[in-house]
Amino acid sequence: MVTIKKTKSFGEHLRNLREEAGLTLKFVSDQINIDTSLLAKIERNERPPTKLVIKQVADFFKVDEKELQNDFLSDQIAYKILDEEADLSILKVAEEKVKYLKTIHNGK
């Protein structure tokens, strides 16, 4: 039997964190110092979070910032692939380019 992990978007992950804690949008937005309507848009994946918002959310909910950042960045990549109707093989090419660019930036 194969177990399939349901992958959530950043916004869905954020909403789950908030709802599991039994908190309102207003309370969380006040705690992380952003507008309630902006937080709602982020949860609905209508607006991207900034790096600062990702950090604030991670700190507030005591979750791994890297995990939230990965959720957000993977959303961006997935939406771009869908928008361009690109083949998934582009991910392998991108992975190789990242390795190459890291060597350039690290001076190796």
Image: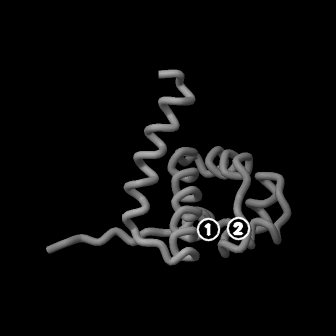
Residue 22 image offset from top left, x and y in percent = 62, 67
Residue 21 seen in render? no
* Crowding near the residue tagged with mark 2, few <14, some 14–19, many ≥20 C-alpha atoms within 10 Å: many
* Extreme residue toward the left, this view: 1
* Crowding near the residue tagged with mark 1, few <14, some 14–19, many ≥20 C-alpha atoms within 10 Å: many
Q: Is residue 68 left or right of residue 7?
A: right
Residue 85 image offset from top left, x and y in percent = 50, 77
> Which of the two residues, 24 or 58, is positioned nearer the viewer here?
58
**In the displayed structure, would residue 67 be above or below residue 90?**
above
Q: Which residue is mark 2?
A: 42
**In the displayed structure, would residue 84 be above or below residue 73?**
below
> Residue at (37%, 64%) from the top-left corner?
89
Residue 84 image offset from top left, x and y in percent = 55, 74
**Label 2 near label 1: C-beta < 8 Å?**
yes
> Residue at (53%, 30%) from the top-left corner?
104
Q: Amino acid at mark 2?
A: Ile
Which color scheme is applied? one colour
Disc 1 to disc 2, C-alpha distance: 6 Å
> Residue at (53%, 25%) from the top-left corner?
106
Quarter containing the N terminus: bottom left
Q: Which residue is mark 1?
A: 11
Quadrant position of residue 43: bottom right
> Residue at (39%, 72%) from the top-left corner?
6
| Local secondary structure at mark 1 | helix
Residue 103 seen in render? yes
> Which of the two residues, 19 or 10, is positioned nearer the viewer here?
10
Residue 3 image offset from top left, x and y in percent = 24, 70
Q: Amino acid at mark 1?
A: Gly
Q: Is residue 82 left or right of residue 26?
A: left
Say which mark, if any, is on residue 55: none
